[in-house]
Image: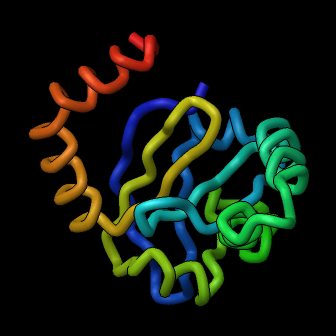
Amino acid sequence: MLIGEHAHNLDAKRRLAIPSKFRKELGEGAILTRGLDNCLFIFPSKYWMPFAEMLAGLSMAKQDTRSFARLFLSAATEVEFDSLGRILVPERLKKYAGLKKSVVVAGLFNRLEIWDEDKWNDYKLTLEKNSDSIAEKLGELGMI
């Protein structure tokens, strides 16, 4: 299970160490792609395939669904871990997420998110302030 958050540094060569507990869950390699809210997603292969198949199955007749599929699928790349447990973040994805040196790797059960640390901290503050109204909306949907 991918849970928790860890602060790490992105080195000058765009290499990022993935915590060992996450590497065990990811296996030999994983899929790195654009995420939502200007972060990056890393999926273990076992979760990537159903997600990619769902995206590929969306209606091509609707602009929103085409765009949503493109967001994830066109940027997806397989990543492998080097001997130190690092992955290489492609320049285009580093730019998309606005990653600087300090990043946060956050586990969200079936995927990891990679955030610029300052953006993550700002996002968390906003999320924490709005948690009651978010919970209320989820309650209205019967989610909690």
Residue that protrudes farthest toward the left in the picture: 129
Q: In this view, does 45 lie above or below 40?
A: above
Residue 66 on image: x %, y %? 76, 68
Residue drawn at (80%, 53%) of the image: 55
Residue depicted at x 34% and y 54%: 7
Asked whether residue 126 appears in the rendered view, the answer is yes
Quadrant placement of the C terminus: top left
- Specify the quadrant of the image occupied by residue 47: top right
Q: How is the image coloured?
A: rainbow
Residue at the spot x=61%, y=76% of the render? Answer: 89
- Residue 82 in view, yes or no: no
Q: Say which quarter of the image contains residue 77.
A: bottom right
Q: Where is residue 70 in the image (x, y as percent from the top left)?
A: 74, 72
Q: Where is residue 52? Give x, y as percent.
A: 83, 51
Labels in figure, total: 0
Tell me the quadrant of the picture where the N terminus can be found. top right
Foreground residue among 67 and 43: 67
Residue toward you, 28 or 40 = 40
Relative to 134, does residue 71 appear above or below in the rendering?
below
2 is higher (above) or lower (below) than 23: above
Query: What residue is at 71 percent from the left and 71 percent from the top?
Result: 63
Residue that extends furthest to the front in the rendered view of this protein:
61
Residue 46: x %, y % from top left: 84, 36
**Which quarter of the figure has residue 81?**
bottom right
Please determine whether, in this image, residue 78 is positioned above or below residue 90.
above
